[in-house]
Amino acid sequence: MSGSVKFIFAGVATLVLLIVLRTAFYTVKQTQQVIVTQFGKPVGDPVTEPGLHLKLPFIQTVNRIDKRFLEWDGAPVAISTALRASPSPSMRTSLGNSHRAPLCER
């Protein structure tokens, strides 16, 4: 092989290696948990520790779930809507009378 062919082969091999390494690592944020799936089926336990983690490139997929999500399992009528009817007292004082519709004189 000539020198230029070896150089091109080394460049392509380095590029492929970088792509494989890039897809092999993933990060988990503090507000996330990750479920790693392989061909659509979960593999191992959920990853809850933040930081850098390793997976099989091109075979395993990372599914991120926000840990801050709080599911409401109570009845839908148990959520109070009374507070939405009028602004809070502190909001009324800061708004003055600007939150009310102007009165029209006849």
Image (cartoon, rainbow, N blue to C red):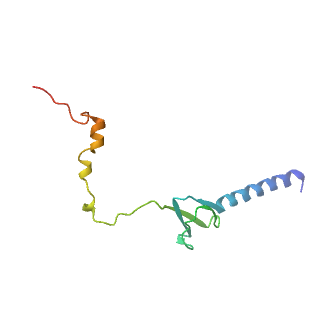
Q: Is residue 44 above or below residue 102?
A: below
Quarter of image, res 96: top left
Residue 84 location in percent, x, y? Answer: 26, 49
Residue in the picture at 27% in, 39% down: 92
Looking at the image, which residue sits at the far top? 106
Which is nearer the eye, 25 or 61? 25
Residue beneath the point at 27% across and 65% down: 75
User: In this rendering, would 1 be left or right of 52?
Assistant: right
Image vertical order of residue 69 relative to residue 39, above or below:
above
Q: Is residue 97 left or right of residue 48?
A: left
Quick one: 56 or 69, which is closer to the camera?
69
Residue situated in front as seen by the camera: 24 or 9: 24
Residue 101 falls in image quadrant: top left
- The residue at the far bottom in this view is 44
Q: Position of residue 48 (x, y in %)?
A: 55, 66
Q: Residue at x 26, y 56 (%)?
A: 80
Image quarter where the N terminus lies is bottom right
Residue 87 in the image: state x and y as whole percent. Answer: 27, 44
In which quadrant is the C terminus drawn?
A: top left
Q: Is residue 21 left or right of residue 82?
A: right
Residue 73, x across and y down, in percent: 33, 66
> How many numbered discs sit on the rendered protein?
0
Determine whether 80 is above or below 96 in the image: below
Residue pictured at 26% horizontal, 33% vertical: 98
Residue, far left: 106
